[in-house]
Amino acid sequence: MFRPENAQSLVGIALTLAVCWAMSEDRKRFPWKLALGALFVQVALVLLLFGLPGAQGFIQALNNGVDGLAAATAQGTQFVFGYMGGGAQPYAVTNPGGLFVFAFQVLPLILVISALSALLWHWQILKWITRGFGFVFQKTMGLGGASALAVAANIFLGMIESPIVIRAFLDKLTRSELFLMIVVGLATVAGSTMVAYATILKAVLPNAAAHVLVASIISAPAGVLLARIMVPEKPGQGGFYADYNSLLKYDSAIDAISKGTMDGLTVVLNISAILIVFVALVAIGNGMLSIFPDVMGAPLTIERILGVVFAPLAWTLGIHWDEAFKAGYLLGVKLMLTEFIAFIQLGAVPAGEMTERTRMIMTYALCGFANVGSVGITVSGMGVLMPERRNEIIGMVWKALVAGFLATCMTAAVVGAMPRELFGQ
């Protein structure tokens, strides 16, 4: 059933396209066919995963898989950290809520999923899945083989790991293809963090694992579209085919597990450090703002400022105005801090203070690496892979950040434009 809230989301899609067109390097060459193809892929994938008969069985299996991974990880965590990792408590518990320690209940999942992803890549399973998505993107959106493969790899790998898949072709990428790869890397998340996000949200959002997975998948074509609008491909350039014999290789299963674990440890340490620093910076900022008088009966905080700035954007995603300020704050947190902090705060919103539909839309809007911190990661990581193009990367990375951020917003708007009955609401 089509409702006014669905029309709001259509406004969000149009606004996203208009902003990117206004920032385009060639406004005369709007990729209409690609726009239709990208929207078709997004809608088709959502309908495939939520609307087809038997889809609920797949979604339930996905949720059970996440629960199983969390339970298995908990055993390893408890073996190492004992009662601090959720094991038997040696003392009487007077505050059960205090037993949840983020560092021990969520971050270890990243280690396990990172190792498992490397193992599945070594066994060719994840590689064939990536090839399948690459084939779909190549045929539906007209991408060259190398670009299609890199876009598909971004769904499961990190924004720095995925370029390694096509490392042999990096020097052949056109400016438009390089920009596209950066944007899609910022518009999606790695498989290692997907499970962590689903774990954070599972208590407050039904089918959280399915929504997080679908969000990362369908944000890829959105990123492709917005990247092509901003930096169009010149006629006759690009389009070469990739060699699927990727340079991302492991010597053995043990080598894959070991290197995957070490890569996961790097991610965990980075996330831990970023969370500590940015939460502290927000506290410092709020402390500085406390010198100002109350505004509309409440203290002035960074949260309130971000809520006001991003509330109109949240409304265009299909969110009711009563919740737009809280949703806008989460968008601001995602952009200025990290999506991890935004997901933690989304999961902390009590069930009665945010509707299930708004929480679902925000899951799609937040599911991407497009934040200020990722700019530095992108420049340093891709600069190592392509030192001769480092200045070119620096020159386009801020525009790519805008495109990556808007890509997840466009994805959220596409989901918001669909009937809520499709998602069982």
Image (cartoon, rainbow, N blue to C red):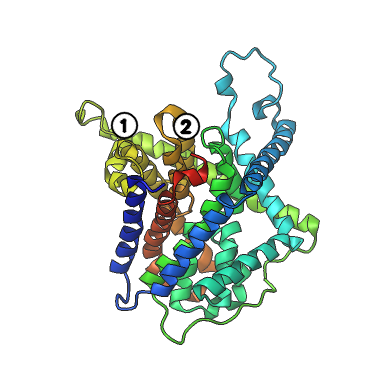
Position of 178 with respect to 102 (left or right) is left
Which label sits in the foreground, 1 or 2?
A: 2
Q: Residues within 10 Å of mark 1 (few under 14, many from 20)?
A: some
Q: Amino acid at mark 2?
A: Ala
Q: Earlier in the sequence, mark 1 or mark 2?
A: 1
Q: Is residue 102 above or below residue 34?
A: above
Position of 393 with respect to 128 (left or right) is left
Give the residue number, with chain letter if any, for mark 1.
Answer: 287
- For the point 56% across and 73% down, the residue is 138
Q: Are marks 1 and 2 in contact (CB under 8 Å)?
A: no
Q: How far apart, in angstroms, are the residues tagged by discs 1 and 2?
A: 22 Å
Most extreme residue toward the front is 1
Q: Is residue 240 above or below residue 283?
A: below
Spot occupied by residue 46 in the image (x, y as percentages of width and height) = 52, 54
- For the point 58% across and 19% down, the residue is 96
Q: Is residue 185 visible?
A: no
Q: Residues within 10 Å of mark 2 (few under 14, many from 20)?
A: few
Give the residue number, with chain letter if any, for mark 2.
Answer: 348
Position of 234 with respect to 60 (left or right) is left
